[in-house]
Image (cartoon, rainbow, N blue to C red):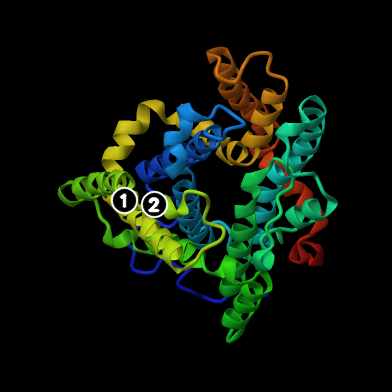
Amino acid sequence: MPKSKSWMAVPAMTGIDPIRLDPGMSLYLDVVRLLAALSVFGFHLGYGKLIGAPFAFLHVFGSNAVIVFFVLSGFVISHVLATSEKSPRAYALARLSRLYSVVIPALILTIALDTLGAHADPGLYPIPLTMAAFVADLFFVNAQWYHGSAFGSMVTYWSLGFEAWYYVAAGLFVFCRGYGRIVWPALALLFVGPNVAKLLPLWLLGAALYHMRGYLRPNALLGIPLFLFTIGLFFLARGEGFFEPITKGIESQDARQLMIIYASGLLFAAHIAGAQMLAPWLAKGLALIEKPIRWTAGASFTLYLAHVPLAFFIVSHDPWRISDWRSMALIIAGTLAGTLLLAELSERRKAMWKKLFAHLWPDAASNAG
């Protein structure tokens, strides 16, 4: 199906090369997504069944980190639609390989680790591994119409039931024609339900931010205050307890929680706007550690998805009391090491998964030739 032009696909009036992001901005976004994944990890370390109290102060950061991921996703998907993924097939192959390169290994790992861990310490695993939850996760309908059962210890998977459908809605909007650009995305969101649709504005905020880049030219005089003020305002709001209503998660939202979620998203978007104005200086400041940033950020999706199954498995076989410093070190180091190993077999192998999906979905134009 031929692609129609859209605000999401054409970076009109930006004055910026659409082929790539500014180097400083690209690097900083990698820093942000790595810090967000580490924040969710730290948040879960505050569980009573993991390390607990020493990490309890991070409880505010978990939900805000997921909000960051949603905004970043809208930004990045808008970029790839404007540059490299300009056909339905290219877009679908890239999204499928991005998701399933991590999802399938993580689901298999969870089955193995939860089974072995529950055998050693049954009380550690309150959520069973069910076929219904596995199938729901595999097809990203785990959040459909308030459906919320987790698959064992992989409690972070819920957000993929939101984000995967934002990918679908964005693709339908860009590649459909006429009224279909509205009808088909609306039907996709109706299929998964209002809970998913209510967080779509976060994703659209990131998309809008991408297309505003042309108005956010290098300007240290404005960029530095905006960059720093948003950080300060976040910690001030945290200190005042503003984010407390969403500390247990953002997957279910009442009106008050939704307003706080949107406010957090706007605050982060303003911060990224400041970073865009500082892109040349960020590029210089981060250049010396570019390789470590790129490499570690390349495992952030794996860390986000697999850290709880890994940490629970380590705890189930931990020879020390949970309050022992050796236990804490083992949980943290073991989870991070396990994440990096799994990333080598999953996230860093997206190209292999893309070839697999390309083989299953042949290019009609190539076959015709």
Identify the image quadrant of residue 337.
top right
Using the rendered image of the protein, determine whether residue 170 is visible from the camera's viewpoint. Answer: no
How many numbered markers are drawn?
A: 2
Residue under the point 57% across and 13% down: 326
Q: Are marks 2 and 1 in contact (CB under 8 Å)?
A: no
Residue 262 on image: x %, y %: 40, 62
Front residue (pair 107, 167): 107
Q: Distance between the residues labelled 2 and 1?
A: 17 Å
Viewport quadrant of the N terminus: bottom right
Identify the image quadrant of residue 28.
top left
Q: In this view, does 349 lie above or below 236?
A: above
Q: Which mark is residue 271?
A: 1
Residue 367 on image: x %, y %: 81, 63
Q: Is residue 166 above or below residue 38?
A: below
Q: In this view, does 318 lie above or below 22?
A: above
Q: Mark 2 or mark 1: which is in front?
A: 2
Residue 245 on image: x %, y %: 44, 55
- Left/right of residue 215 with respect to residue 92 in the rendered view: left
Identify the image quadrant of residue 191.
bottom right
Dot 2 amino acid type: Phe
The secondary element bearing badge 2 is classed as loop
Residue under the point 25% across and 44% down: 232
Packing grade of label 1 (10 A; few <14, some 14-19, many >=20) is many
Per the image, the residue denoted by label 2 is 243
Residue under the point 41% across and 50% down: 244
Front residue (pair 108, 312): 312
The secondary element bearing badge 1 is classed as helix
